[in-house]
Amino acid sequence: MTVPAVGAGAIAVDLAWSLLGFYLHAAMFAAGATLVSRQEEIASVTAPPILLSCLLVNVVMLDPGSTTSTVLSLLPPFAPVLVTARLAAGDPPAWQVLLAVALTFATAGGMTWVAGRIYANSVLRVGARERVMDPLRGKSACARGAAGPNPCLRPSTAAHPVRRCLP
């Protein structure tokens, strides 16, 4: 059995978008997951982007060449799903696909950095709930005076430069 050239190209493009989308969403979900305190809360962080992408496919499929479809397919969180839908429904200009790839790749790299920063500044803390911006600034809930089960701080040392809440 042979695969036509068009079919092989479509499979390669879908595979590339799947890998790029996996990289972006893994970084986004890693950043969000470090902000929750219990495993049960992870679904509230991961479900909205996935559901929104699935719903937006319907908008794109109704009119793949519309301005709305074009703009939505360029936004990195939605690009892996919506660009492949636009490719399947029609033939978008190459510059739009390349711009979507560049924006998605840049956003994935940025989200990897942000997820690492949030992880380093929040995952080892216990006590009060972290705000989204505090881990990016290197502040903990304890440092801002939030009441929690463990409000004390261990002073920074050369061996442990990050201040952590003690158990």
Image (cartoon, grey):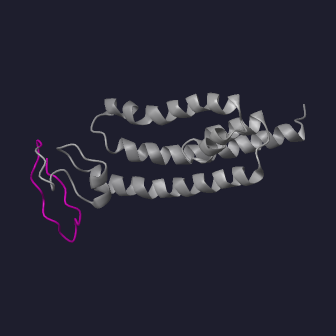
Q: To which quarter of the image does residue 17 belong? A: top right
Picture mark count: 0
Residue 66 location (% of width, % of height): 69, 38
Query: Residue pushed farthest front?
Result: 67
- 114 relative to 127 in the view: left or right: right
Q: Estimate the x, y position of residue 120 in percent, counting from the top left.
A: 32, 56
Is the N terminus in the top left, top right, bottom left or bottom right quadrant? Answer: top right
Question: Residue 53: x percent and y percent?
Answer: 56, 34
- Closest to the observer: 157 or 79? 79
Q: Residue at x 16, y 52 (%)?
A: 165
The relative height of residue 108 versus residue 60 in the rendered view (above or below) is: below
Q: Is residue 121 left or right of residue 27?
A: left
Q: Main secondary structure of the magenta part?
A: loop
Specify the segment rendered in magenta: 148-167
| Residue ranking furthest to the bottom | 158
Confirm whether the magenta stretch covers residue 37: no
Residue drawn where x is 34% and y is 53% of the image: 118
Residue sitting at x 22%, y 49%: 125
Q: Is residue 161 magenta?
A: yes
Rendered residue at 33%/32% (across/down): 41
In the picture, measured across the screen, residue 163 lies left or right of residue 56, that is left
